Image (cartoon, rainbow, N blue to C red):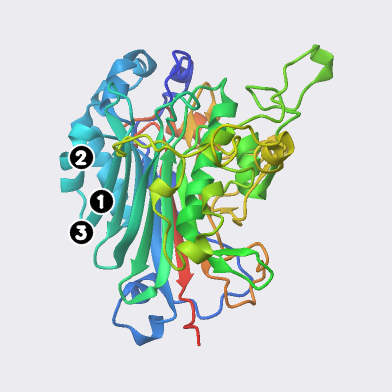
Amino acid sequence: MDHSAATQSNQFTLCRNHNVTFDTHRRWDPVPVKSRKGSKSSKAAKGTHDPSARDRIEFTLMNYNILAQDLLDSHAQLYSEHDPQALPWEERCKRLTAEIERIDPDVLCVQELQENHIEAFCSRLKQDYGMLYKKRTGGDKTDGCALFYRRDLFDLVNHHKVEFYQPKKLNRENVAIIAKLSLKANPRAKLVVSTTHLLYNPNRQDIRLAQVQVLLAELDRFAYCGKLPNGIPQYDPVILCGDFNLQPFTAPYELLSKGYLRYDRLESRSLKASNQRRGYVEKIGKFFLPPALGITDKCQHNALKDREKDHHGQIPPSHMTKLHHSNHNEVKSVPNDAESSNGNSPAKETDVRSEFSSGSLCHRFVFNSAYRHHGPDAEEQRQATTFQDEWITVDYLFYTPYRSVAECNRTLPNWNLELLQTYTLPTVQQCCWEIGCIPNKAYGSDHFALAGRFMLTIPKEEL
């Protein structure tokens, strides 16, 4: 849910059809691939005793913002034109879990799971899942993110619950979860999964970009698995999903999808390109994320430069970073990067700017979106995940098909995560004229679920 008094004020015009079912508009579509060598059926590949599946495994991941009931009730005016019988939690939970059962995910990522609804929600899930949960920080928050994984398919190697709230630096209570999983049938096969729910405020794109930068640094800490001979880092396969509260082709989306963003010339809060015809508009400038957080403009933790030597083959512990976390008993006394090693004299401005205030951001992941995003020139093909004054996309499922930026070639052995199928989203036109406002008698949330079927290639043993 995205909470603005105007968010769904004109959605009453869309509440036409209460008889539609999710089978009408949601289906599995194969991803066109010219060559897919050795692809197995999902049923065969999920079996842990099939010798033919030893070098690859197929799995399904689903992402769903399920709409916390507390948020629905506290913003009842947004749902005044909805079918009132479709809004109680008991009814919505049945529809939510029915769609989850239909997808039958091996990994399930959820946003807006209310803390006191965890037991009821989990009791309706058919699979034996392990669960990680992180409630939004702040005393008045009652919902958060959850990550479920099948116990018979995966082992949990490590995990971290990311808090975007950083005292005096980032004052929003959003969170994320990162989990590193290993395949039970072959522990050498690793998968890093992360889910998040970023800030809603439509006027603060800069905060969402900062949250993305923090999350990318934490993913870099978790997924890093060594360097190529030329020094380029390699990563375990990553799936990043959630409610990002941002639309395609915005600045944070560009950073995620292209790996690079020049931010210094963008407008300070909207992060739109400056329009000189509108007169003077404040630009964001080169100072963005405070250097005291220790996250460089390469979206990496500066404190982990020597991780090859100090943490070879291991995930560096979170206390090695300079990020605040409520689970830490004490505030770490670590010098800022803007200070010298004795903590008294400021470092040279050029040293700070070379890593922290360059005016651009980049990262070393190769993210693809499981869903194709269309611009204004393809209006009829544009899909939607929720309604915010209009039908738009704010939920994403990103994945990394390659282990490094130097290996973007399907013929290489490190091409290790392939998207096989996607659970199609309805188009904007279908939402307007056929589905109507959500939640309804078919859909249990005010967001549509995302899902993808992937093939994970197991890395060969090093000699």
Disc 3 element = loop
Instruction: Please tell me how crowded label 1 is: few (under 14), some (14-19), or many (20+) other residues with Cα within 10 Å.
Output: some
| Residue 379 in picture, x, y percent from top left | 66, 36
Q: Which residue is mark 1?
A: 131
Identify the residue position indicated by label 2 in the image: 118
Residue plotted at (51% across, 81% down): 38
- In this view, the residue in front, 432 or 167, is 167
Single out the mark in the foreground, 1 or 3: 1
The kind of residue tagged 1 is Met
Q: Is residue 296 left or right of residue 330?
A: right
Instruction: Say if residue 237 shows up in the picture.
Output: no
Question: Would you say 441 lies left or right of 293 here?
Answer: left
Dots 1 and 2: beta carbons under 8 Å? yes
Residue 84 versus residue 119 in the image, above or below: above
Quick one: label 2, few (<14), some, or many (20+) residues within 10 Å?
A: few
Q: Give the residue at mark 3.
A: 128
Q: Is residue 81 above or below residue 110?
A: above
Q: Residues within 10 Å of mark 3 (few under 14, many from 20)?
A: few
Pointer 1 or 2: first along the chain:
2
Residue at 62%, 55% in the rendered image: 364
Tell me: residue 409, above or below residue 285: below
Residue 159 point in image, percent of width and height: 34, 53
Nearer to me, 299 or 134? 299
Asked whether residue 190 is in view, the answer is yes
